[in-house]
Image: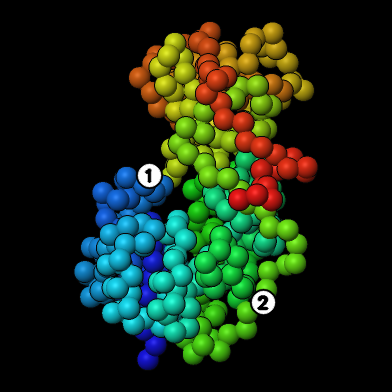
Amino acid sequence: MKRIGVFGCKSTTLFLLESLQRVAEIDCVITISPDKGKAHQVADYSDIAPFCHNQGITCYSANRYDLKDEQDVDTFKTLQLDIAFVIGWQRLIPTEVLQTFSIGVFGMHGSTDDLPVGRGRSPMNWALIEQRKHFFTNIFRYDPGIDSGDILDTFVFSIQPDDTGETMHYKNVLAMKTLILRNIDQLSNGNMSLKKQKNSAPTYYPKRSPNDGLIDWNRDIFQLDAFIRAVTSPFDGAFSFINGEKVVIWRASIFETDLVEFGYRDEPFGTVVEVYPSRKFLVRCRGGLLIAHDYGGEVNIERGSLLHSPQEDLKRFKLNRYGYHDLEEA
């Protein structure tokens, strides 16, 4: 019987552990403690240890998230695992750790196109920000590079106009589940067929941080709608300021475009033009009106309030020749 491990520290890890348990015995889960999850700002972090304890699964909490601690490497040599799945683990696996697995370590990476296009960080967020229509989830065998391993299988799903960072996570985890379940037999016996990534120049999406959720009110209304959906829960949310007080917009939608005139076209972008009894409010944007359904902050939002984002704090990510954010340099 092959010994199977799972790397992960997110709610997606728990979901897939439950699915994987139905078809295979999990021998060990490699995770990080809540303190390390907080220190590394892991979005959607979940403490996996209680689940492992309840299920009788060995749980190893790594000393370092990047697994470059000597004790971490020695532990993998002792565990003698044959195969592992990486699900909700945002770090590369060191060569010294990969070499301890007889079959290999298999991870998931999503992209807006076939790999090697769209390697790198935060691909689901970028897919929404760029208003893409499809998402590619790949299962591949890890090598020391960045998402550069040989591919076992790919699942493609559509991106709907109302998808958010949350629903993209849900879709992606179902894609992961499907890929693992339809390949588990081949993986367990080591009899799998891998293919090289396309012979084209790799591109890499940059890392996003919570501060990158600052809203640029000079963007058009479609870009703003996509941006807010991209960084909502389980991420840190899109935000701006009113009189120096932070306002986080968790859910918004396009109320109307400028094809219909409600009388607000002369208002500066970012102006709150109406506040309803429900406390939902309308914002004047380039090309139309945005309605904020769900938001947070201590400030009292009134008609005429101006949502302001300091220009010096807006991060300007580089674009490739097609207007997207994946670049040829990592």
Spatial distance from mark 1 to mark 2, Cα to Cα?
34 Å
Q: Residues within 10 Å of mark 1 (few under 14, many from 20)?
A: few
Residue at 40% in and 17% down: 245
Up/down of 53 relative to 308, above or below: below
Q: Say which residue label 2 marks.
A: 195
Q: Say which residue label 1 marks.
A: 41
Query: At which x and y percent is residue 242?
Result: 46, 14
Query: At which x and y percent is residue 190?
Result: 51, 88
Up/down of 254 relative to 101, above or below: above
Residue at 30% in and 51% down: 36
Residue at 61% in and 73% down: 150
Q: In which quarter of the image is the N terminus?
A: bottom left
Which callout, 1 or 2, points at the residue further toward the start of the chain? 1
Q: Please name whichever residue, 164 or 153, is drawn nearer the observer in this view of the structure.
A: 153
Q: Is residue 95 left or right of residue 230?
A: left
Q: Please name whichever residue, 60 or 234, is drawn nearer the observer in this view of the structure.
A: 60
Residue at 50% in and 54% down: 169
Residue 168 - label: none
Mark 2: secondary structure: loop
Query: At which x and y percent is residue 328?
Result: 69, 50
Q: In this view, does 306 lie to the left or right of 199?
A: left
Q: In this view, does 110 lie to the left or right of 74?
A: right
Q: In this view, does 47 lie to the left or right of 212?
A: left
**Total residue callouts:** 2
Q: Name the colouring of the figure.
A: rainbow
Can residue 100 be seen here? The reply is yes
Q: Please name whichever residue, 26 or 83, is drawn nearer the observer in this view of the structure.
A: 83
Q: How crowded is mark 2: few (under 14 residues within 10 Å), some or many (20 or more)?
A: few
**For residue 109, what is the image quadrant?**
bottom right
Can residue 88 be seen here? The reply is no
